[in-house]
Image: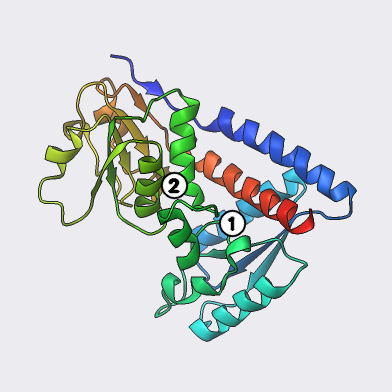
């Protein structure tokens, strides 16, 4: 069969158009949305991503301030900064960029981000609201997977979805979002005894483990849909996903490309969250 490319570019463009219009309306009232990007690393890949976020914000009329704490910042220093920005009415949204300095865990500092400004849904409170089915910001990458599937008219109700990866950033929150869509969800991880035995029973396979080429043709059944969340550096300096696209092609009904699939939708949703936060704060 011909495997359909599940591009996220069209969806991202629609989301961005809406965010730009709403941001412009806020700016006209003197209330331009404002995002604080807190960075505590000197990682080149992180710097590239932060720069791309700043450019995306600029295109949409969102003010974006990068706050560099340095790669040797302590957990106390990061928490203090997040607490200060959370209390500052000048900022509508806060995003803490990873990776964090050695010895600092995201769980140890993310709780300092106020839930109403936690646009990437990383704090324990935000994750708890999601697990409880209550309103709040959810991790943008997880949300992007669900929105991409909906955009391409792929049904979720009653279908079996295998999520490969159990991080608090993607795998776990994605499982909650899929359950809310009435899917039957299996979460696989590094201790799953026979990965292929699980994933080949699924209607939809989401690869979010951070391992290049982990999912191959042997891991999916004929006609399954595959969503690739992976962003791994290739030997030539490019970006590749967690799915061996060549191996899956011709067997999967649909496959999201890397780049151009989940990525642009994630960024667009982050920007939408910033505008949402600004509208709530500024009325």
- Residue 241 position, x and y percent, is 36, 42
Q: Is residue 21 shown above or below 208?
A: above
248 over 235 or under it: above or below: above
Q: How many marks?
A: 2
Q: Residues within 10 Å of mark 2 (few under 14, many from 20)?
A: many
Residue 197 shown left or right of residue 269 in the figure: left
**Element assignment for label 2:** helix
Camera sees residue 231? yes
Identify the mark nearer the N-term, 2 or 1. Answer: 1
Q: Secondary structure at mark 1?
A: loop
Q: Residue at x 61, y 51 (%)?
A: 52
124 w.r.t. 269: above or below: below
Q: CA distance from mark 2 to mark 1?
A: 13 Å
Per the image, the residue denoted by label 2 is: 142
Disc marking residue 270: none
> Is mark 2 in CB contact (under 8 Å) with mark 1?
no
Numbered tag placed on residue 119 in the rendering: 1
Q: How busy is the neighbourhood of tag 1: few (under 14 within 10 Å), some, or many (20 plus)? A: many
Residue 161 in picture, x, y percent from top left = 29, 37
The residue at 64%/45% (across/down) is: 272
Q: Quadrant of the N terminus?
A: top left
Residues 30 and 40: in front is: 30
In this view of the protein, can residue 235 be seen by the observer? no
Camera-side residue: 250 or 141? 141
Q: Is residue 98 left or right of residue 228?
A: right
Q: Is residue 102 left or right of residue 205?
A: right
| Residue located farthest toward the top when viewing the structure as drawn | 1
In-front residue for pair 40/268: 268
Question: How was the colour assigned to the protein in this rendering?
Answer: rainbow
| Image location of residue 140, percent across then percent down | 51, 49
Residue at image x 69%, y 74%?
87
**Where is residue 77 drawn, in percent x and y?**
57, 84
């Amino acid at each position: 069969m011909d495997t359909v490319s599940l591009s996220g570019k069209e969806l991202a463009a629609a989301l961005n158009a809406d965010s730009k219009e709403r941001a412009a309306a806020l700016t006209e009232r003197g209330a331009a949305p404002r995002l604080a990007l807190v960075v505590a690393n000197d990682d080149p890949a992180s710097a590239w991503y932060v720069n791309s976020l700043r450019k995306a914000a600029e295109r949409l009329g969102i003010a974006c301030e990068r706050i560099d704490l340095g790669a040797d910042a302590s957990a106390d220093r990061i928490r203090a900064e997040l607490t200060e920005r959370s209390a500052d009415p000048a900022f509508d949204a806060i995003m803490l960029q990873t990776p964090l300095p050695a010895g600092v865990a995201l769980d140890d500092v993310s709780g300092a981000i106020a839930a109403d400004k936690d646009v990437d849904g990383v704090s324990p409170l935000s994750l708890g609201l999601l697990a409880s089915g209550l309103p709040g910001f959810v991790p943008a990458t997880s949300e992007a997977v669900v929105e991409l599937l909906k955009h391409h008219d792929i049904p979720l109700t009653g279908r079996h979805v295998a999520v490969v990866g159990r991080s608090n950033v993607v795998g776990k929150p994605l499982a909650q979002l899929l359950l809310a869509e009435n899917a039957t969800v299996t979460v696989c991880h590094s201790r799953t005894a026979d990965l292929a035995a699980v994933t080949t029973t699924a209607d939809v396979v989401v690869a979010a483990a951070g391992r290049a080429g982990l999912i191959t043709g042997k891991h999916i059944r004929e006609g399954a849909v595959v969503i690739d969340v992976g962003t791994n550096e290739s030997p030539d300096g490019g970006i590749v996903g967690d799915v061996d696209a060549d191996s899956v092609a011709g067997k999967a009904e649909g496959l999201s490309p890397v780049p151009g699939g989940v990525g642009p939708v994630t960024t667009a949703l982050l920007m939408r969250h910033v505008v949402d936060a600004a509208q709530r704060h500024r009325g």
